[in-house]
Image (cartoon, rainbow, N blue to C red):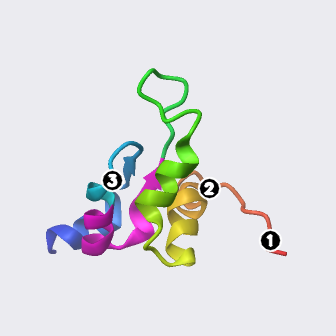
Amino acid sequence: MRPTEKFRNSIYACFWFERDGPRQLIERIGPDNILFETDFPHPTCLYPDFQSHLHSSLAELEPAARRKILSENAARLYKIRMPEAT
């Protein structure tokens, strides 16, 4: 099994302050095993302006990939039922 396949099958990665690393990781392994975190309330967290960071970090991604990284991957990992889209 190739390292990228092994990663996709068993590892999740998180990011919060990085800008270029997440893009490169998404290009290599896809958006299915990547999670965004704010690291709140630690001193290194992005609060209160995490949304501008997200916009600059993930702006190039398709909406479906952004949804995975910002919510769906965590819900799948932690077995949390997502509300139905309206």
> Looking at the picture, how far across and down is residue 59, in whole percent?
47, 68
* Residue 30 magenta: yes
- Looking at the image, which is closer to me, 75 or 56? 56
Q: Quadrant of the N terminus?
A: bottom left
Q: Main secondary structure of the magenta part?
A: helix
**Helix or strand or loop: what does disc 2 sit on?**
loop
Please give the residue where the numbered disc 3 appears in the rendered image. Answer: 19
Q: What kind of residue is marked 2? A: Lys
Q: Residue at 56% across / 77% down in the picture? A: 64
Q: Which one is nearer the viewer's eye here, 34 or 58?
A: 58
- Number of the label disc, if any, that sits on residue 84: 1
| Residue 72: % across, % down | 59, 63
The residue at the far right in this view is 86
- In this rendering, position of residue 61 left or right of residue 10: right
Range of residues picked out in magenta: 23-36
Q: Residue at x 27, y 64 (%)?
A: 25
Front disc: 1 or 3: 3
**Badge nearest the viewer, 1 or 2:** 1
Task: Tell me residue 37's x, y (percent).
Answer: 49, 44
Which residue is nearer to you in this view: 48 or 34? Answer: 48
Q: CA distance from mark 2 to mark 3?
A: 28 Å
Going from N to C along the chain, the mark reached first, 1 or 2, is 2
Taking the image as shown, residue 18 lies to the left or right of residue 46, namely: left
Q: Is residue 46 magenta?
A: no
Q: Is residue 68 left or right of residue 25?
A: right
Q: Earlier in the sequence, mark 2 or mark 3?
A: 3
The answer to which of marks 1 and 3 sits earlier in the sequence is 3
Q: Which mark is residue 79?
A: 2
